Image (cartoon, grey):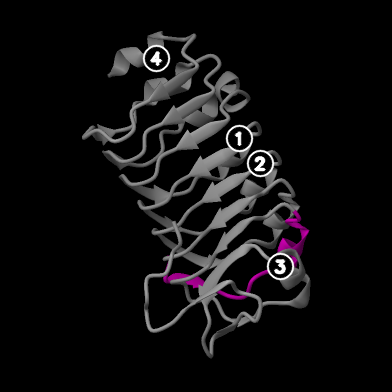
Amino acid sequence: PCAIGEATNLGRLNLRGNSFTGSIPTELGLLASPHSLWFDQNQFTGSLPDSLFANLNFTNSIKNLVLDHNSLAGTISTFVGNMVQLKSLNLGANNFEGIIPSELSQLVKIETLKMNENNLSSTLPPELGTLTNLGNFDVSKNPLLTGTVPEEYANWVDIEEFYLQGTSLEGEIGDSICQIMDDRIFVADCSEEIDCPCCSTCCTDGEDCHLE
């Protein structure tokens, strides 16, 4: 409801797993110091409201933004990079399209970054290699995602889970990335297009092998 913006001291809001429809309220941008918003597993539509990025109190406070398994669409705004306190951003299983903005590299505290099961295209930004706190990165099931895996991702020394399957990525996963993925979960389409000698799981022939 629109009145949610009047609860300016609201820190956490969990709407997970209901049947809410419509767009995400623009009034959320009025929250003074939100910590976590869990809106996943609903039926929200539309794009991310610009108001979320216009309020410095919001962008400097939010730590967990979980929006997966809805029907959100449009592009991922470059202004998402303004949410500099974010530790978890989950945009998976929506209808986002366009590029992965390099401005996500500003999320220097991010630990979980999921954009799987969308319609994202273009390439993986090498700038994301600066996200040295990243533990879980998932861009699986974006069939229009092309190019190679940037060597800069070898800086992810804390990475525990790395999902690339169901994309059109190609080339060989370099030794530097393989070194950090030793004994970690690393899933990709191991094929003629992408050579992943250090993957913990290889997906072939369209097999759904995303580990839970």
Q: Nearer the viewer, residue 101 or 132?
A: 132
Quadrant of the rendered image containing residue 147: bottom right
Residue on which disc 3 sits: 182
Residue for badge 1: 86
Residue 100: quarter of image: bottom right
Q: Nearer the viewer, residue 46 or 183?
A: 183
Nearer the camera: disc 1 or disc 3: 3
Q: Residue at x 64, y 42 (%)?
A: 110
Q: Earlier in the sequence, mark 1 or mark 3?
A: 1
Which amino acid, mark 4? Gly
Residue underneath mark 4:
5
Whole-number angstrom distance, CA of label 4 to CA of label 3: 46 Å
Q: CA distance from mark 1 to mark 3?
A: 27 Å
Identify the mark nearer the N-term, 4 or 3: 4
Per the rendered image, the range of residues in magenta is 142-157
Q: Amino acid at mark 1?
A: Leu
How far is disc 2 from disc 1 in space, using C-alphas? 6 Å
Could you tell which of marks 3 and 2 lies nearer the N-terminus?
2
Q: Are marks 2 and 1 in contact (CB under 8 Å)?
A: yes
Element marked by disc 4: helix
Whether pointer 4 and pointer 3 mark residues with C-beta atoms closer than 8 Å, the reply is no
Element under disc 1? loop
